Amino acid sequence: MKLFKDLRDGYVKWHANKLRIPAFDTSPAVRKHVVFSGKVQKVGFRLELFTIAQRLELTGWVKNREDGRVEAELQREEAKVDFLIEAMQSLKRASVDACEVTDVPLNGTNEELTIVRQEV
């Protein structure tokens, strides 16, 4: 089973690194809380979101929820955050049925982007 997960993860990273990132105009910093619903777990969705967010130099976190959704808080320039949210909704491997986006206060600390792992 680990072999299949490793193969999938390799494909997900390759796919995420293949995405063309446009040049962005300067935009204000924002922090958005996002919850993706649909077929978003066990398809590499969280890893793809993380990989693209790293390329965009976003900060925050992403995690799987027990209810089958994927939740994230993303911070940096608004244009980059919005680009990532739109890119994740257009994945062919996943099926995003709904995306709830809420503005939240900026986090003033120098945080990194992290994947929050569930306790087993």
Image (tube, rainbow, N blue to C red):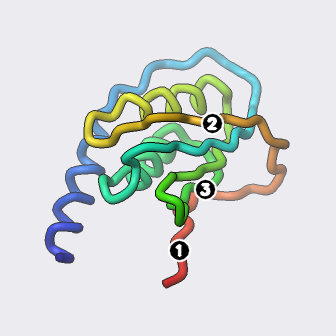
- The reply to whether the C-beta atoms of the residues labelled 3 and 1 are less than 8 Å apart is no
Image location of residue 64, percent across then percent down: 50, 61
| Numbered disc total | 3
Quadrant of residue 32 within the rendered picture? top right
**Left or right of residue 119, residue 33 in this image:** right
**Badge number at residue 61:** 3
The residue at the point 60 percent across, 50 percent down is 72
Quadrant of residue 21 within the rendered picture? top left
> Which SS class for mark 2?
strand
Structural distance between the alpha carbons of marks 3 and 1: 13 Å
Q: Residues within 10 Å of mark 1 (few under 14, many from 20)?
A: few
Q: Residues within 10 Å of mark 3 (few under 14, many from 20)?
A: many
- The reply to whether the C-beta atoms of the residues labelled 2 and 3 are less than 8 Å apart is no
Residue type beneath disc 2: Glu
The residue beneath circle 1 is 118
The residue beneath circle 2 is 100
Q: Nearer the viewer, mark 1 or mark 2?
A: 2
Structural distance between the alpha carbons of marks 1 and 2: 21 Å
